[in-house]
Image: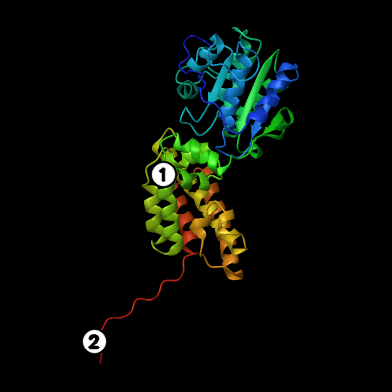
Amino acid sequence: MPAESKRVHRLRAETPVGHDDVLEGLWNAARRGRLPHALLFGGPEGIGKFLAAEFFVRGLACEGGIGPPCGRCGPCKRLLSGNYGDLHLLDIHALGKNEIRICYMTLRTDDASKKEMDGNPEDNVDTFLSLRAAEADWRIVLIRDADRMNSQAQNALLKNLEEPGERTLLVLVTSHPDRLLATIHSRCVHVGFEHLSIEECERITREHALSVERAGLLSRWSCGAPGEALELEARSAPALVQAIQDALTGASSPLVAARRAAETEGDFLGATDSARARHRAQVTCELALRVVSDRLRAAVGLGADELAFGAEVAGSPVGVTEESRLRAAVDDLLEARQDVERNMNADGILDRCFLALGRLAPPREPARAQGRNR
């Protein structure tokens, strides 16, 4: 990378859990010279796909040979310190942005692109791949949350997928492969990842200083995805779910619950207050969808122990009328979530979300008039 780059392309020293077979299969392909030039790591959110991708890349570069990295050799140390010249890491999450724009893919010198790239427009995929290898056989591009590429960025990346160059490897990591162009899918080999067990997830989240109770709760909500469990903690999911529950039970009016959600502090993505507010609204809508969807599953006969939010929906009404109301609420919540992508006002999105939840609340008993007995 150019010496003036302000971004550090540093990998983590952690070892992924639960994906040994997938990684060993990829390393075996590399040892035989059969590794494809483009890989698409897909699977549920927060299960460690990106950490597995980092570990895989480290294992390709390790001086001890292709396989689990030693962590002690020169390439391993340089990958961990961000001084490895043959890796381009694009982690939009670490940059605090919601979208991967075209300037991350190819050189753009307009003022907006320079601002987006912190004044260094040459820190992009095209420029990186135009340079000679610094120390290894592989020139590796690793993109986290590849589904966050807008259409221009995806089309710009296609050129490198179609004409990758000698010993070039592109690894795209995504939890939403449906958001990628069909032409990207057709040029990548898909690598699938699965959830961990709830017990493994709890152990990992407790290592990140979560209490036993909170680790168990978030591991259940995330269905065994430790990365998602930790994100739920960072984004104050318990407080948001409480507001959702209060609207569903009638403990709070929908608009009061919506304001509580809007005021909830957390690690929400975005470069501006309005962008972070929209992300908070998106997270809230997604949590509401999951709670209501589990309530619908309970209404049609699934047991609470089979559901991520089973404890939260236990005892909810069941029957044909309830099922119909729940399906209507799911449609309303999906529409509210789409409003985020339309860049609509975050407060309006939350109002729409909680009004949909409020329509599922039991009717309130009319207040009794007070007076003296006659």
Amino acid type shown at disc 1: Ser
Q: How many other residues sit within 10 Å of disc 1, few (<14), some (14-19) or many (≥20)?
A: some
At 55% from the left and 24% from the top, the residue drawn is 90
Amino acid type shown at disc 2: Arg
- Residue 354 lies, in percent from the top left, at 46, 57
Question: Is residue 344 visible from the viewing direction of this image?
Answer: no
Q: Is residue 6 left or right of residue 161?
A: left
- Residue 333 lies, in percent from the top left, at 54, 54
Question: Quick one: SS at disc 2?
Answer: loop
Where, by quadrant of the figure, is residue 101 drawn? top right
Locate the C terminus and report the quarter of the image it occupies: bottom left
Report the mark closest to the observer, 2 or 1.
1
Instruction: Please give the residue where the numbered disc 2 appears in the rendered image.
Output: 372
Q: Are marks 2 and 1 in contact (CB under 8 Å)?
A: no
Task: Check the image and name the residue furthest to the bottom.
Answer: 374
Q: How many other residues sit within 10 Å of disc 2, few (<14), some (14-19) or many (≥20)?
A: few
Mark sitting on residue 103: none
Q: CA distance from mark 2 to mark 1?
A: 48 Å
Where, by quadrant of the figure, is residue 159 drawn? top right
Question: Is residue 86 visible from the viewing direction of this image?
Answer: yes
In the displayed structure, 311 sits above or below 121; it is below
For this rendering, which residue is in front, 74 or 44? 74
Question: Quick one: SS at disc 1?
Answer: loop
For this rendering, which residue is in front, 361 or 14? 14
- Residue 60 lies, in percent from the top left, at 63, 17
Instruction: Please give the residue where the numbered disc 1 appears in the rendered image.
Output: 236
In the displayed structure, 286 sits above or below 145; it is below
At 40% from the left and 42% from the top, the residue drawn is 211
Q: Earlier in the sequence, mark 2 or mark 1?
A: 1
In the displayed structure, 228 sits above or below 137; it is below
